[in-house]
Amino acid sequence: MASTAPTAPTRLTIHPDRALPLDPQQREVAREIYAETATLPLICMHGHVEVEAFAQNRPFADPAQLLVVPDHYVTRMIVSQGATPESLGIPRVDGGPVETDSREIFRRFCSSWKLYRGTPSRYWLEHELVNVFGVDVEPGPDTADLVFDQIAARLAAPDFRPRQLLDQFRIELIATTDAATSRLEHHALLAADGLGARVVPTFRPDAVVHLDRPTWRADIAELGAVSGIDTGSYAGYLAALRERRAAFVAAGALASDHGHLSADTTPMDASAAAELYAQALHGEPGSVTAAQVHAFAAHMLFQMAAMACEDGLVMQIHPGVLRDHHDGVFAAHGQDKGFDIPVATEYTRALRPLLQAFGTDPRFRAILFTVDETVYSRELAPLAGAYPSLRLGAPWWFLDSPEGMRRFRETATETAGFYNTSGFVDDTRAYASIPARHDLSRRVDAGFLARLVLEHRLRLDEAIETAVDLAYHLPKLAYARR
């Protein structure tokens, strides 16, 4: 007679050699290299953790609100299998009904655990569950409540607050991403509490440089209000941007962040730019064409580079994503809900105007990111290998994965070298995943460097030094003020 005893839940463990090479000899060398980087401090210069989390330092709400609802890496996979955003607790713009039972949301996530097999999300989540939350059973339909309770117990601990986690995660420096119209009051609070040099803002002007944004006119008005400069003219607009950049620098900012569809940096004639700005601001809604929107955005990338030469902010440029691919999801739930899709991106011609003007200027630094990996060896590595102002950013977004990182090293290193890259900087708004992301990068780099050692292309001491530089020194150098 078959036993009716309940099956014990599968234990959740993470292997010490995860993401290291399969070949035993290469793995042994990779272990030695990785050991030298595993406990280094984290430099987190390209993330999107909200500054309010650090300023307010409140306890995290619950496991679903921390790990599921705000993380589009997690929710998009479940939505791709037919679930609705509402069923995952993703708020509606109109305040309409969504699932509010966090346990039910978490059960849906745990029941979808197998969907993450083979994805970087699986690696990050397992690392978080085991190393951050002390979870010892694998998520699944029958263990969801148990896993929820184990995480909730950790969240309730007094040392599990955003500020306290800076030390637990060994975060030496973390940058938030802040709109150009931010009044930076939360950063001022952090500075008053002695954290101003550890949690720094990043200047993100996208909302005020894309003329087709639904809130563009309101954002321009707010830019004027926060800067104290009349933005009714193009000259006032540029002056207001310079004022806000100066405020960000005073608050400790090291970089600006630019998310454009195209990498085009063609400048416009100043009078033409002024006319187009006036048309967009004072003309009939919809009177600006798509071509004019593109031209103004390209012009403003060029202008941002010119301003960077003045104030020293490092430009982070990451084009090539068609945001909000599904109009209905955007209308219902807003931005960053998993429907941003990469497009093919050209850099060589697009960046030439900017690089002709500033590419050899010692005051200028730009870090280039891409989600179109076909351009690594063809365009980005040769550009970074020639222009002293350029560095290649870490594999980003869809390429922030074991195979994506390996392909990056294989396709970019021979032309750009290691030292024309930024080292690893994570791209996440999921705070608890930051250590996992850095750990994965360090393991992949250790594996790549181990192969070079075994092929007698590097000495072991050189490989270890390079691994340490990629994990720690290069990010600090790439974002250092010029």
Image (spheres, grey):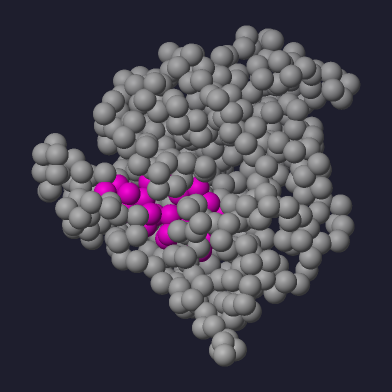
Residue beneath the point at 71% across and 38% down: 324
Chain part drawn in magenta: 424-447
Decide whether residue 439 is among the magenta residues. Answer: yes
Against 329, residue 74 (above or below) is below
Residue 54, how many percent across, how many down?
56, 63
Q: Main secondary structure of the magenta part?
A: helix
Q: Nearer the viewer, residue 143 or 337?
A: 143
> Dividing the picture into quarters, in which one does residue 230 lie?
top right
Residue beneath the point at 40% across and 28% down: 376
Residue 288, how many percent across, how many down?
79, 18
Against 272, residue 334 (above or below) is below
Q: Nearer the viewer, residue 167 or 310?
A: 167
Against 428, residue 223 (above or below) is above
Residue beneath the point at 30% across and 61% down: 17
Decide whether residue 392 is among the magenta residues. Answer: no
Q: Is residue 313 visible?
A: no
Left or right of residue 294, residue 222 in this image? right
